[in-house]
Amino acid sequence: MNIVRRDFLSLATKGAAALMAVAAFPSLVFARNDKAFGAHNLADAVANRYPGMTAADSDKITLKAPAIAENGAVVPLTVKSSLDNVKSISIFVENNPAPLATSFNLGPQNIAEVSVRIRMGKTSNVIAMVETDAGLFQTKQEVKVTIGGCGG
């Protein structure tokens, strides 16, 4: 592959500009909701992530989680939804110091299924919330933790 000096300089300049944008405005680039992730109780985390919305229980959301997590530092979860027009999927852990564990914004071409590994400090309800055009829906499951993963 022959790269011309001019092409190399162009690519290097574009790369440097992108890195500067990330360094200067990380919240814009990564779209992180610091109020939701920084909340210390479930009600505040939900209110900051989904302002003005109330969640209804739904049987069209599947939350696959272990009944007993041997190690709270690594708890595997899968959330799948058959609801139409899913915009986001968020996972909350009721008794964690910061209840919002993760959140995914989905586009119209995405399949509404996510798999993650989260940390849990102690036994708690894990709540999966799915935002759609029709509103906010949830399902929850209790996960018992034998060894805490959030500093415990």
Image (spheres, rainbow, N blue to C red):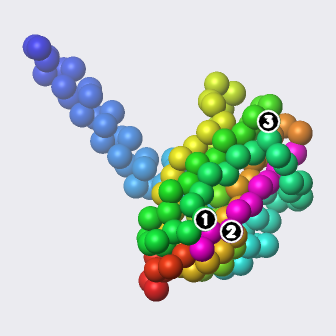
Image marks 1 and 3: residues in contact by CB distance under 8 Å? no
Q: Residue furthest front?
A: 67
x, y percent for residue 58 = 84, 48
Within the magenta stretch, is there residue 21? no
Total marks in image: 3
x, y percent for residue 53 = 87, 56
Within the magenta stretch, is there residue 143? yes
Residue at the image point whose x is 56% and y is 69% from the top? 68
Up/down of 24 relative to 46, above or below: above
Query: Distance between the Cα atoms at labels 1 and 3?
Result: 25 Å
Q: Secondary structure at mark 2?
A: strand
Quadrant where the N terminus sits is top left
Q: Earlier in the sequence, mark 1 or mark 3?
A: 1
Q: Secondary structure at mark 3?
A: loop
Q: Secondary structure at mark 1?
A: loop
Q: Which residue is mark 2?
A: 142
Q: Does the magenta stretch mainly form a helix, a strand or a loop?
A: strand
Three-letter amino acid code of the residue under disc 3: Leu
Up/down of 9 relative to 42, above or below: above
Q: Which residue is mark 3?
A: 83
**Residue 121 vs residue 26, the one in the foreground:** 121
Q: Which residue is mark 1?
A: 67
The picture quadrant where one finds residue 112 is top right
Query: Distance between the Cα atoms at labels 3 and 2?
Result: 23 Å
Image marks 3 and 2: residues in contact by CB distance under 8 Å? no
The boundaries of the magenta stretch are 135-144
Image marks 2 and 1: residues in contact by CB distance under 8 Å? yes
Characterize the local packing of mark 3: few (<14), some (14-19) or many (20 or more) Cα atoms within 10 angstroms. Answer: some
